[in-house]
Image (cartoon, grey):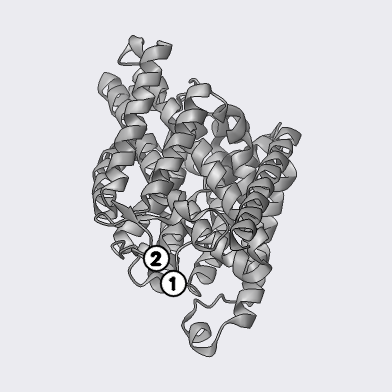
Amino acid sequence: MAKRGVKLIRDIGLVAASLIVLNAVMGAGIFGMPGKLAEQAGQYSPWLILLFGALIITVAWTFGSIASYFKTTGGPVTYASYAFGPLVGFQVGWLFYFGRAASLAANINVIFNYMAYFWDGIANDYIRTAMFIFIIVGLTFINIIGVRAAIKSLNIISIFKFLPILVLILVGLPYISPNGFLPSNFPVIDDVGTLVLLILYAFVGFESVLFTTEETKNPTKTLPRALIINVIVIAVVYFLIQMIYVNVVTESSNDVPLIALGQILMGGAGVVIVIISAIFSILGSASGIILSAPRMTYSLAEQGLLPKWFCIVHEEYRTPTNSILFLAATALFLGITGTFIYLAMASALARMMGYVICILALPVIRKQADKETLDNAVKLPGGFLIPGLALFVCFIAAYFSPLLSWIYLSGFLAIGGLLYFANYLYKKRTAD
């Protein structure tokens, strides 16, 4: 039974927060990125991953600092609302939410591409739809019955997700040659924009854990640590996989590059390992989304920016039931109709613009914080140097984003604005 006034429970520690970050960032990207990067930058592609990973750390570090000022849930929504008012906060939350919902639908559909290697019947539209519903309903049920159950399922999925990747790295490391590790000739990059976007977008999604602040133990310390540590870990994993790939694979399909890598390193067993890892990796990302994204609408409703229906918490399980159900319904619609493909094109840009607004909020948050909060907050060396670099990274991504993404982004903002003002008028009418 769901009731208003029932509070969320703090059950997320550093390990669980780290798993949310890892699963949010490391999804389908690691299984689709190596071939395209190798095609564009050759043996320099691993080093470009480290370079852009270092740049993304400035964004995560800045978010870690911002998060240390707050103990309530909402993440970027709370930060933007605190600094710039409820309308901006709502639009930030709406953009992040819609981007995550589209990613959830997209990720689950990618699972079916890998499952096709085992079962040709998955290509049937009816079977595909039934499987999509089954996965969404299963993840929804797990998340409704409690955050502990959700975290346990995330732990299990993470083992099957990261263990095969670790096996690929350990088996592939001996194949790295000195010449392949430090190549002498820098390649001519034909499409700089695609290369930059591909690497930068492979790191986005870390902000998901910030929406669980109210359910996180000691969030002012746990969240900054989870963000920074895991972005570093992810960059190293991407680097090693890419380094092994460019040293081992000469020709492969850009759509499923790691299958070629697994085939060369371990034969048929390697193919099976890669496919299983891909399925669990993408499933892990989906689990992370359905754990964190409902906390966005929950926070928006708590702040009065969405109807109170969204912030109703289950009396027994202490989870935002209605928000979880709404996300499931949204993802089902996007995934089954296929419109998520086009919406996903703008989701990464939407998150980058959300990053920009939150980074710009940091000086305002610092100025308005009381002495105790300011003393306990994460300090950034160099003043605003790191936030400045973080803004630069976001503007690079925005500059290289295609026009179509900007069109869809504008559409998202318009829809969000209509929802906000419709809720405002409803509250005003009921108050009268």
- Name the residue type under label 1: Lys
SS category of the residue bearing label 2: helix
26 or 421: nearer the viewer: 421
Residue 323 horizontal/vertical position (percent): 43, 48
Categorize mark 2 by other alpha carbons within 10 Å: few (<14), some (14-19), many (20+): many
Query: Would you name the residue on which mark 1 appears?
Result: 71
Give the residue pinned by disc 2.
Answer: 214
Give the answer, above or below, for where 69 lies relative to 256: below
The residue located at (36%, 58%) in the rendering is: 17
Q: Indicate whether 328 appears above or below 363.
A: above
- Residue 155 drawn at (x, y percent): 26, 48
- Please name whichever residue, 329 or 354, is drawn nearer the observer in this view of the structure: 329
* Dots 2, 1 in contact, CB < 8 A: yes
Q: Is residue 61 visible?
A: yes
Q: Would you identify the image quadrant in which residue 169 lies?
A: top left
Up-down relation of residue 103 to residue 288 (above or below): above
Location of residue 318 (image quadrant): bottom left
Q: Say left or right for 368 vs 297.
A: right
**The quadrant where residue 405 appears:** top right
Residue at left offset 40%, top offset 45%: 324
Q: CA distance from mark 2 to mark 1?
A: 6 Å
